[in-house]
Amino acid sequence: MGFRKRHNYKNLKIWLLALEIANDISDLLIEFPKHERYDLTSQLSRCSVSIPSNIAEGSAKTDKSFSNYLDISLGSSFELGTQLLIAKHRKYINEQNLKMLEEKIEEFQRMTMDSKMD
């Protein structure tokens, strides 16, 4: 059996940014209306938590498998961006919060796509 490189996810800048995004979303959801608890709030929460979680899970895998987990995280980041636009349309978040989160998500997406090109 060959050497299998592992990643310490807690040292990965991409994981740290993903965790920051998940925590920002959590803080934002406190203000959402109660009737959204099982719909958009739940979707945003699960999606944002999925991003760093998949990076952490993939870090225990081979480089090829890790790349697949990065793909899943990347997909979740696009899903999260869409959900934030829905939240903005429903007036649950303001333009400033949307812009701040979109910038972080775009940075995450660039980092993810750049790491896949290495």
Image: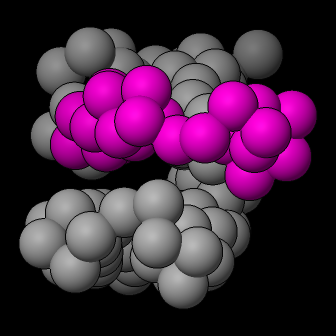
Q: Is residue 32 left or right of residue 36?
A: left
Q: Quadrant of residue 17?
A: top left
Residue 89: percent from left, percent from top: 54, 84
Residue 10: percent from left, percent from top: 26, 15
The answer to whether residue 4 is visible is: no
Residue 105: percent from left, percent from top: 32, 67
Q: Is residue 104 left or right of residue 77?
A: left
Q: Nearer the viewer, residue 89 or 77?
A: 89
Q: Quadrant of residue 20?
A: top left
Q: Residue at 26% of width from left, 70% of height from top?
A: 94
Magenta run includes residue 36: yes
Q: Residue at 46% of width from left, 72% of height from top?
A: 91
Q: How did the renderer colour the structure?
A: one colour
The answer to whether residue 96 is visible is: yes
Q: Residue at 41% of width from left, 36% of height from top?
A: 31
Q: Which residues are magenta?
A: 17-41
Q: Residue at 74% of width from left, 52% of height from top?
A: 40
Q: Which quarter of the rendered picture does the N terminus lie within?
A: top right
Majority secondary structure of the magenta segment?
helix
Q: Which quarter of the rendered picture does the C terminus lie within?
A: bottom left
Q: Nearer the viewer, residue 118 or 53?
A: 53
Q: Quadrant of residue 7?
A: top left
Residue 111, placed above or below residue 10: below
Magenta run includes residue 51: no
Residue 70, placed above or below residue 107: above
